[in-house]
Image (cartoon, helix red, strand yellow):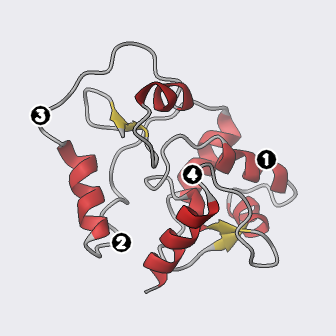
Amino acid sequence: MLTDADGAVLASGWTTDVPGLMTLGRVVGAVEHRDDPGVPLKALLSYLDGDLTAIDEVPVRQRGGQFITHAWEVLRQVPAGGPVTYTEFADRAGRPAAVRAAAMACATNAAALFVPCHRVLRLDGTLGGFRWGLPVKRWLLDFEAA
């Protein structure tokens, strides 16, 4: 997980590839090791301990166009255990006909988990895609449904 000096998540995922995360999150500049794990890591640990809302208030900073940025905010409102389809997601984002654009918001989301794109499914209920692999997406959905 990469955060800025204020503790906002810039990029996160299931990897130890920091340069890859920096590219994913379009992070410019040096990344410094922090002794204090900060709010994002504490929230992640609480989430894994079963508090599925712990990640909801963690600040996130991503760069994107107007619709994509709005769509990421909408994703943060999809509750754990209540996945939506890409069609529902597009509708919630205010552009019901923009299903592909909604899918693009998921695909370009650098702050996985904190912007829970794993909670968006295909119309038929299948998983669709996920940058970190479908087994991770399935695990997250099952964990949140338990």
Quadrant of the image containing the N terminus: top left
How far separated are the C-alphas under marks 4 and 3?
26 Å
> From the viewer's perspective, is 37 left or right of 65?
left
Using the image, determine if residue 48 lies above or below residue 72: below
Give the mark nearest the N terminus, 2 or 4: 2
Contact between labelled residues 3 and 2, with CB atoms less than 8 Å apart: no
Answer left or right for 121 relative to 146. right
- Is the residue marked by circle 2 packed among few (<14), some (14-19), or many (20+) residues within 10 Å? some
Q: Which of label 1 and label 3 is nearer to you?
A: 3
Among numbered discs 2 and 3, the one appearing first in the sequence: 3
Q: Distance between the residues labelled 4 and 1?
A: 20 Å
Q: Name the residue under label 2.
A: 52
For the residues labelled 1 and 3, say whether their Cβ atoms are less than 8 Å apart: no
The residue mark sitting in front, 2 or 1, is: 2
Gap in angstroms between the C-alphas marked 2 and 4 = 20 Å
Circle nearer the N terminus (1, 3): 3
What label does residue 92 carry, if any?
Answer: none
* Amino acid type at image mark 4: Trp
Q: What residue type is labelled 3?
A: Asp
- Which residue corresponds to mark 3? 35
**Which residue is under mark 4?**
132
The residue shown at (73%, 69%) is 88
Tell me the element at label 3.
Answer: loop
Between residue 13 and residue 97, name the one nearer to us: 13
Q: Which residue: 60% across, 74% down? A: 83
